[in-house]
Amino acid sequence: MTETFSEQLAAIKKRASNLYFDSDRFQANKDFNWLFEQAERVQELEKFKSMIKTLYKYIHLSAKKSVEENKKLQEENKRLREAIELTSDELSYAKITGNDDARHVYIENSIRFLDEALEGEE
């Protein structure tokens, strides 16, 4: 059975705490304690690193989605702007023409341009 890092660290700590406290072993015990503290810090940093990776992935996906949405909105704005320009031109022609049939065609074209632009939103 393979022990996890935490389990192995706990077992070593337990064994090290059973050392005698003569001068050399006391120093060794202090050294072990320092090493254990460092190992615990590494564990905390590994957890922190994992959280940062998860956060980075979320931010990256969110930013990518925002860029895609922005591009889609720009394309939609361009399409609507073009439809408005075409409609404005058609209505200008309808206003100045003296022919009722031509005026009707210009107005129908205007409506068609707007309908097509709005259908493209769906």
Image (spheres, grey):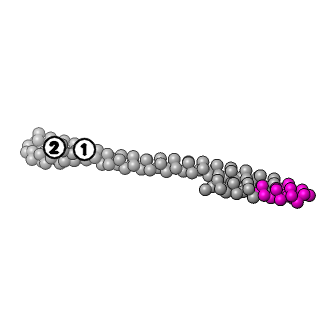
**In the rendered image, is residue 96 in sight?**
no
Please state the horizontal and vertical placement of residue 75, each as a whole percent of the image.
Answer: 64, 49
**In the rendered image, is residue 17 in sight?**
yes
- Residue 118 on the magenta span: no
Mark 2: amino acid:
Met
User: Which residues fall within the magenta stretch?
Assistant: 92-110
Nearer the observer, 53 or 11: 53
Q: Residue at x 74, y 56 (%)?
A: 112
Image position of 64 (left or right of 73): left
Mark 1: amino acid:
Ala
Main secondary structure found in the magenta portion: helix
Badge 1 marks a residue whose secondary structure is helix
For the view shown, which residue lies furthest in the front direction? Answer: 101
Q: How many numbered dots are placed on residues in this image?
A: 2
Please state the horizontal and vertical placement of residue 55, each as a whole percent of the image.
Answer: 42, 50
Label 1, residues with CA under 10 Å away: few <14, some 14-19, many ≥20: some
Please state the horizontal and vertical placement of residue 11, each as a whole percent of the image.
Answer: 15, 47
- Label located before the other in sequence (2 or 1): 2
Q: Residue at x 64, y 53 (%)?
A: 120
Q: Which mark is residue 1?
A: 2
Check disc 1 and report the residue beneath it.
39
Which quarter shows the C terminus? Answer: bottom right
Q: Residue at x 67, y 57 (%)?
A: 118
Q: Residue at x 22, y 42 (%)?
A: 35
Numbered disc in front, either 2 or 1: 2
- Residue 98 on the magenta span: yes
